[in-house]
Every structure is written in C-alpha cells, then in structure tokens.
Image: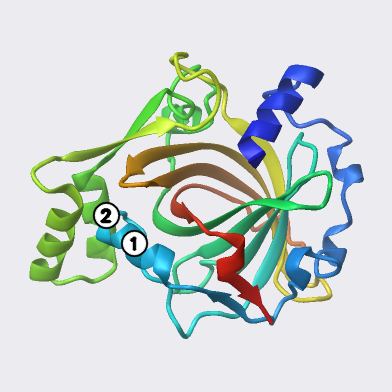
Amino acid sequence: MAWTEAYQYAGKILGKHSSVANGLANQHQDSNQADANLPLKARIGGVLQLQKTPFIRAISQGSLIAMPDDGNCLIRAISRVRLEIAGSLYRYYLNTGDQDANESFVQLYQNEQGDISEVMYYQRLTRFVPETIEDQQAFSGEAGAGLGDRTYSLWRAQLEAQFVDNGLDAATLANNLNSIFGDSDQIDYSRDAGDPNSEFVAPFKAQESRIDDAIGQHGLLQDIVFMPYSRALDGLRESLLISTEIVRSRDGDTSRREIHVDFMIGIPVELDRLLIQ
C-alpha cells in the first residue's frame, strides 16, 4: 500500500481526510531525534546511491526528471512528514534548495509493519510565490477548486520562465522546451488521490519537520498543503507533486516565515536500486 492509499483509508475510517489532528505531533519523535533509527539506517552525512537505470529510462520516454548529479549524493537533511496515516513518511534531502542548488529528496513510506512499500525520487521543477489572496486560496484548495482539481496542466510558458531564470541560452532553451512539449503548449496530469470522477478533492494537509544537522540545531518547520498528480509514460508513471509550503520557522527563528508553491517532478525507485552507506 502506497502512502496516498494509506492516507485515504485513514480518512474513511477516522473521518479526518482534510485536516491535521491537534495531537498528531505527539505521535512522532521530536525533531531533534530525527537522525536516529531511520529506515535503511540513514543519517545526515550518509552517502545515498541511486542507480541510473530508472532515470535513463524515464528521460528516454520524455519525463521532465533530470539525471541526479553524481557529485551530489550526501544526505544533507532529513525530515518527517506528519500525516494522518498508519506508518511514517520520511524525506532524505540531497539538496534542501536553500542555497543555489535545486531541491531534491528521496521520499520513503514505511508501513505499520516497518516495511518500506514506496520509494520516490523528487526534484524541484519550479517554484511559484502566491502573492494574492486568490492565488493562495487556489493553491490551498480553500475555494473548492485549484489544488485538488481532477487534472492539472503544466504550460510551456511556465517552464520557459524557470529555464530562463536558470541562465540557459536561447538555443538550449528552445531545444529543452521542444523535447518536452513538442508541438503542444501544455502537459496534462491526472490527480493521484480520491475518486477519479470527482472534479475536486481537498488536498492533503501535513506538517514537515526537517533537520539539517544531526543534533537538530538547524532546520525548518513548515505546514504543507499538497496533492500528487501523475501522467503515464511508456510503462512508467511520472509524478507531479504540487505543494504549498508555509514555513513557520527556520533554525527556531519564527520571524523567518514565508509561503511558496513547489512543483516537484518524481519517479518511483525500486528499493533494491537504492543504497545508503
């Protein structure tokens, strides 16, 4: 069972599909303990190795995923995502995105029996800052539409702006966009949760506690409102995780608050293709 299925099952049983329970944090370890007793014996500073085969296959089929950097294999941060589900959701960050490097992480879902039943690799495709009330409502699902709609489309112009920000020259920009979109101006994704016939499903709400060092001195705490979407490639599903992140504190400093929307591209990774040393 994947974490999205576990979440929906818990929502049916508990009747709490769209809100985070007040006492949920008490069911998890404190954030300063997040570097201990982790799946696959992960730790900050550990080396995470991913086989390239799934990425080569995905890219050859037109996925937006980029090949992970060989020189970027250290686990730089670890987080726990607190959800109303049986089991635990972890993220092992290869890049936090706080500096110039693009954010990327491996996400693991560990079920109640302690088995890892889903592993995904995600990297940030683009980031959007919702500056108006209307944008914030759309990307929080508060208006009953937007994030949580049955489908979502990535537009050529949306990615073009991101590529320009990354400093690509005109020729490289055109080649990248043409390889992604071809003759189309958009790529369509379907919602990966809820009744596929429902026009809208309330997005998931959770809290993420991330630590950037083993003793928990540095890190962040944020509320996240998110929905997974996907599209079918040849024998593979590419995930588009849209996540509104409301940063509550950084390094314990509550004055460093912000809100942004991250668009993360991901592909599934087989557990036997993942090694942590």
Q: Quadrant of the N terminus?
A: top right
Query: Residue 206 got which mark?
Result: none
- In this view, the residue farthest toward the top is 198
Is residue 110 found left or right of 31 in the rendered image? left
Q: Residue at x 69, y 82 (%)?
A: 277
Q: Residue at x 70, y 34 (%)?
A: 6
Occupied quadrant, residue 230: top left
- Mark 2: secondary structure: loop
Q: Is residue 94 visible?
A: no
Q: Is residue 4 above or below residue 39?
A: above
Observer-nearest of 77 and 109: 109
- On the image, the x and y values in percent for residue 160 come to 21, 54
Observer-nearest of 240 and 40: 40
Q: Name which residue type carries label 2.
A: Gln
Mark 1 vs mark 2, CA separation in Å: 6 Å
Residue hosting label 1: 57
- Do the residues bearing badges 1 and 2 touch, measured as CB atoms within 8 Å? yes
- On the image, the x and y values in percent for residue 112 come to 83, 44
- Mark 1: secondary structure: helix
Residue hosting label 2: 61
Is residue 179 found left or right of 269 in the rendered image? left
